[in-house]
Image: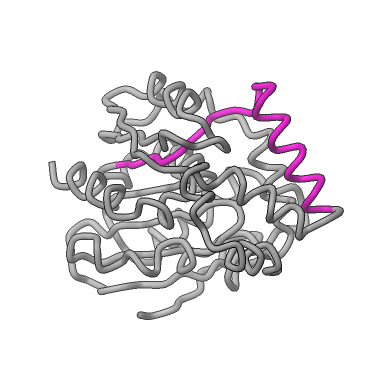
Amino acid sequence: MNKVFVSTNHSHCSYHIYQPNQSDYPLILLHGTNSDGLASYGALLDAFDHREIIVPDYAGCGDSSLPEHDLTVSFLADQVIAIIKERGSKKVDLVGHSLGATVAAYVAAQHPDFINRLVLSAPWCHGDDPRHQLVFNTWQTLEETAPQQATAFGLSHVLSPTFLANMDPELIARICATKGLTDTYRRIALGKDLDIRQHLSKIQAPTLVLAMAFDTLVPPYRAQEVQSAIPNSEYDEIPSGHAVQLESPYPWVNRINTFLQD
């Protein structure tokens, strides 16, 4: 697997290339708030159909830089577009999970000619929701003042109750003691207040919107709102909590593969 850097006007972004030049439409996988590309998808790359896969690390994740100014969806989208242009791809299949889904939706709306098919997994499109504000405000405050408690709080929302209840308590303790990524609170703040509603109707690519049925970080009604605003889109649910790559990875990958093959 190759690791590459690309520069934009305000940052540099690292990304990994798996099986280069193996398909007409490379697959780009965008990660969420408190992760990086390989941590999110590294164990699943062989489960996707045989093709070129591009896995970025953006905005403080991996070896990618954060801007000095406010972090925006547009900034993260610029990093993704820079990668597509550098690879010389005419079109890509774009998959985003969580915060990565909002970035993917924005990219698809602003640059429809680059997108063959789009998958938005556990997306949301705005922060104008009291429950969303409560969860994300609490998460951000803990991240700024008590990072270990922030990890525990996040874990309690990204895994379904049944899955979490059956985890080894020592494993839970080790996860909660793990140091988070650089300036995670800034990506939480972005997720708390972003608003891409006005862009969703501009998406032209066939789109699959996936909700996680037991997700308490981004509940299914938030994904349903996204799907209802996108033309030529379909909706489905995976029986999982938010961290589907950990909890229910292969049903998730199989549903995406089926959609991309249609």
Q: Which residue lies furthest to the right in this view?
A: 145
Q: Which residue lies at the image location 41% right of the left edge and 53% below the top edge? A: 247
Would you place residue 90 above or below residue 231 in this image? below
Q: What stretch is highlighted in magenta?
A: 118-144
Location of the C terminus (image quadrant): top left
User: Measured from the top left, where is residue 219 in percent x and y?
Assistant: 51, 30
Q: Is residue 176 above or below residue 131?
A: below
Furthest-left residue in this view: 262
Percent from the top left, x then y, of residue 181? 67, 65
> Residue 141, percent across and down?
81, 45
Is any part of residue 91 visible from this angle? no
Which image quarter holds the N terminus? bottom left
Left or right: residue 148 compared with residue 108: right
Instruction: Identify the residue shown where x is 47% and y is 49%.
Output: 163
Q: Looking at the image, which residue is at 48% across and 38% down?
A: 106
Any part of residue 237 in sight:
yes
User: Residue 212: image x %, image y %?
Assistant: 42, 37
- Tally of numbered discs: 0
Is 150 situated left or right of 245 in this image? Answer: right
Residue drawn at the location 29% of the way across and 59% of the way down: 89
Q: Does the magenta stretch include residue 140?
A: yes
Up-down relation of residue 117 to residue 56 (above or below): above
Residue 44 appears in which quarter of the rendering? Answer: bottom left
On whether residue 124 falls in the magenta region, the answer is: yes
